[in-house]
Structure formats: structure tokens, C-alpha cells
Amino acid sequence: MFHCNLFLKKFLIYKFCICTFLKLKWVRLIVQLLNLLQTSSEYPGFLEVLIRDLATPMEPDDVKKLATVLNTLASEKHKALKAVKGKKKTKKVALGGSNKASKGVDLHDYSTTYGDEYDGFI
């Protein structure tokens, strides 16, 4: 019985490795074939239709994972594009709490002369 379980485990591991290798080989082949079409102007639309048709029979959670992968890829490409272009430098607006902003404010003390002009009123 022990030999049977060991044999079964080895067989399943072997089968999994072979299947994984073949899947990777097929994936590489499909990617190479699709990359040949990349210069076409209809390529983005073709991929949209292809991915939508491939994702239609999938479970909702799997489609959500696929969407997350594509969104992550898009974000990384945007960041890389921004890094290549470089950021435009903008002036920062001075906030009111600093000493530089209060230079034009009159800080004269009016508390000593406030009541003098109304003394003759009554």
C-alpha cells in the first residue's frame, strides 16, 4: 500500500509538471502568434473581443481576478510612461501659517488709541 501511494504521488507530480510545462509552452506560442498582429490598427479591439469571449464562461470571481491583473498592468504602464516623460514642476502655494505670508500684514497695536476719537460724543 505504501508503494502504491508513493507511486501515485510521483505520478501526479510528474503529470502536473508535464501539464504545467505544456501549458507554458502553449501560452508562449499563443503570445508569439498574437504579438505578430500587434502592428495592426485593429489589434486593441481584437483583444477586447477575444478577452471578453474567453471570459464569458468563467466564474465571476475569476473574471474579477483577470480584471485586477489588467488594471494593475495598466497602472504600471501609466507609471512607467510618467517616469519617461518626467513630471512638470509646479509652484507650491504658500499657506497662511508661515512667516513669509504675514510680511504684508499691518501688526500695529491699536488698543491704546481706540477709544480717543469718541470722547467728545456725549
Image (tube, rainbow, N blue to C red):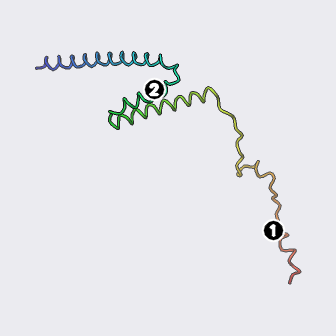
| Amino acid found under the numbered disc labelled 2 | Phe
Q: Nearer the viewer, residue 104 or 20?
A: 20
Position of 19 with respect to 7 (left or right) is right
The foreground one among 35 and 114 is 35
Q: Nearer the viewer, residue 48 or 70?
A: 48
Q: Which of the two residues, 82 or 113, is positioned nearer the viewer here?
A: 82
* Dot in front, 2 or 1: 2
Indicate the position of residue 94 as horizontal and vertical percent values.
72, 46
The kind of residue tagged 1 is: Ser
Which residue is the extreme one toward the bottom? 122
Quadrant (top left/top right/bottom left/bottom right) for the N terminus? top left
| SS of the residue under disc 1 | loop
In the image, residue 36 sits, relative to residue 111, either above or below, namely above
At 82% from the left and 66% from the top, the residue drawn is: 110
Dot label at residue 22: none
Q: Quadrant of residue 78?
A: top right
Residue drawn where x is 38% and y is 19% of the image: 27
Q: Which residue is mark 2?
A: 46
Separation of disc 2 and disc 1 at Cα?
78 Å
- Which percent across, then down, holds residue 36? 47, 16
Determine whether 80 is above or below 20 in the image. below
Packing grade of label 1 (10 A; few <14, some 14-19, many >=20) is few
* Identity of the residue furthest to the left in this view: 1
Q: Quadrant of residue 49?
A: top left
Q: Is residue 66 left or right of residue 10?
A: right
* Residue at x 42% of width, y 19% of height: 31
Q: Which mark is residue 111?
A: 1
Q: Position of residue 104 (x, y in %)?
A: 81, 53
- Residue 103 locus on image (x, y percent): 80, 51
Q: Residue at x 25, y 16 (%)?
A: 14
